[in-house]
Amino acid sequence: MKSFDKIIVANWKMQLSLDKAKEEAKEMKKLLSKAKIGEDTVAIVCPDFLAMTEVAKIFKGSDIILGAQDTYPGDTGAHTGEVSLSNLKSLGCQYIIIGHSERRAMGESDDSINQKVKAVLEHDMVPIICVGETYDERKEEKTNFVVIHQVYEALKDVKLKEGQQIMLAYEPVWVIGSGQVIDANEADRMSQIVRQSYIDAMEGQNLEALSILYGGSVTPETVNRFTSLEKIKGVLVGGASLDGESFIEIVKKA
Ligand code: PGA
């Protein structure tokens, strides 16, 4: 799969009605077709599962790539309420967010995240693994430990095949949806911790497969603060991705 130097991911969470999702998807497609973005930039949109089929039809033939917010760690079968990777793939979905802090808060374990990472790679798709500390963990000076631990657990026994990619999104949980952003120095410091954790967890292999993203209240005004950092290739955007115009502004300014 092609790799990109600037990666902008929209996480729509459970925020949009089906009609609104279709409307914003059409707006994004229209605005992106007019925007002059380089070949090395990619816009990925992760709608909720219900909106996926309709949004996939809208994005067909555009430069926007479909992603998912989660997955079952495997294929079709007797798993009530789950969604399979092969069905996601058949819709054109190439990227899967795994271990978002909102799912970790609902009880998703490190082990489940690890299984999903392996399953996504088995299907030749790209996992976007979210890591980050809570406010209490930061106050207790556990930030580095938490992030290193989450990267290690997510990548346990992961073996990459030639050409496969992994994205690690550093998202300080206390910043998500808060309207605050951390300063560039801290984002830079954390990206180095994420990178070093990846190198240690993968025993030095496949460093070229890694892209580091930043997430947490990113807007068109702040995106460049993060994407201008040497080790950060892109952003994961929640609130500011719900409006087509604002999301495409982020893509243009990244
Ligand atoms: P936010 O969400 O941009 O609304 O802070 C980011 C995320 O949850 O990934």
Image (cartoon, rainbow, N blue to C red):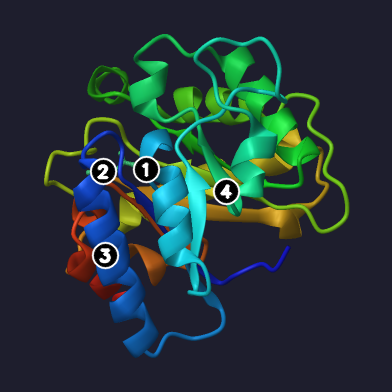
- What kind of residue is marked 1? Ala
From the image, tell me which residue sits under label 3.
247
- At numbered mark 2, what does the secondary structure look like: helix, strand or loop? helix
Q: CA distance from mark 1 to mark 3?
A: 18 Å
Residue 69, above or below 116:
below
- What kind of residue is marked 2? Leu
From the image, tell me which residue sits under label 4.
95
Query: Is residue 218 shown to the viewer in this render?
Result: no
- What kind of residue is marked 3? Phe
Q: Earlier in the sequence, mark 1 or mark 3?
A: 1
Crowding at mark 1 (Cα within 10 Å: few <14, some 14-19, many 20+) = some
Q: From the viewer's perspective, tell me whether residue 164 is left or right of residue 229.
A: right
Residue at point 69%, 37% (across, down): 86
- Residue 3 coordinates in the image, percent (x, y): 66, 67
Residue 244, above or below 45:
below
From the image, tell me which residue sits under label 1.
51
Q: Nearer the viewer, mark 1 or mark 3?
A: 1
- Of residues 122 and 172, the one nearer the viewer is 122
Q: Earlier in the sequence, mark 4 or mark 3?
A: 4
